[in-house]
Image (cartoon, helix red, strand yellow):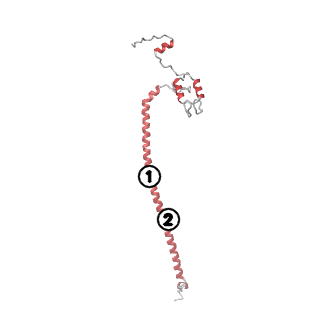
Amino acid sequence: MRDKFRVPLWLTDPEGFWPRVSAGLGILAGILVAFSLRLQSENTKNQIEIQKLSELNDRQRKVITQIGSTLDQVAAKLDKIAEDQKNWRETAAPVARETPSHTHTLSADLNGDGIVDWPDFDLFVQSWDKTGHLPTDFDRDGKVTWKDFEILAAQWMKKEAWYTEPPTSPLNTQQARGEETQDLPNTDQQ
């Protein structure tokens, strides 16, 4: 019977098969332990990354909430500005429509009254020899100089087409016509 069921020698050899299987299983176990440790390490790293992302997400949510609150405040302010503009248009617009618009052709008419005269000269003198983008720098060279004074002098007493003389007192009207005016008697007693 033994011949029928012949067991291979390598299975019966105590120094052959089983020590090799045992060594192979040891190596396999070592590989499995190393792989398991690596998976645990990666899992820990992933959990740390997930925690960091969660914290970042929480911070982002807080910032978004703050921005949303700020945007709501800005929107409310813009709504108030729009309402104020609407109210202004309703109250001030009729006045603005009644005011005639004028074109200004005289650069030396600094106060915009339609004539280049003494008030314009006073404004010119206040900015004399100053630098920058000034309305009195007529030639736009960056400084108020004699060249600008020449432009003022060339436009002196010139009037815009829309300019009208201001009303004058009766006394000035009489003097302008060359009429003599009667002096009032002196009532002060000395």
Name above or below for residue 153 compared with residue 177. below
The residue sitting at 45% across, 50% down in the picture is: 64
Depth order, front residue of 4/32: 32
Residue 20: which numbered mark, if any?
none
Instruction: List the single residue furthest toward the left.
Output: 189
- Element type at marker 2? helix
- Element type at marker 1? helix
Instruction: List the single residue furthest toward the front.
Output: 190
Name above or below for residue 154 compared with residue 53. above
Estimate the spatial distance between the alpha carbons at disc 2 and disc 1, rounded to whole Å. 28 Å
Identified by mark 2, the residue type is: Glu
Name above or below for residue 51 compared with residue 142. below
Depth order, front residue of 185/67: 185
The residue sitting at 51% across, 71% down in the picture is: 34
**Considering only order in the chain, which callout, 1 or 2, is on the residue closer to the N terminus?**
2
Q: Is residue 114 visible?
A: no
Which quadrant, please, contains the C terminus? Answer: top left
For disc 1, the marked residue is 61
- How packed mark 1 is, by other alpha carbons closer than 10 Å (few <14, some 14-19, many 20 or more), is few
The residue sitting at 44% across, 42% down in the picture is: 75
Depth order, front residue of 159/34: 159
For disc 2, the marked residue is 42
Q: Position of residue 2 (x, y in %)?
A: 52, 89
- How packed mark 2 is, by other alpha carbons closer than 10 Å (few <14, some 14-19, many 20 or more), is few
Q: Position of residue 10 (x, y in %)?
A: 55, 84
The residue sitting at 44% across, 47% down in the picture is: 68
Identified by mark 1, the residue type is: Arg
Name above or below for residue 184 compared with residue 123. above
Q: Position of residue 188 (x, y in %)?
A: 40, 13
Q: Is residue 125 visible?
A: yes
Q: Position of residue 104 (x, y in %)?
A: 54, 26
Q: Quadrant of residue 54?
A: bottom left
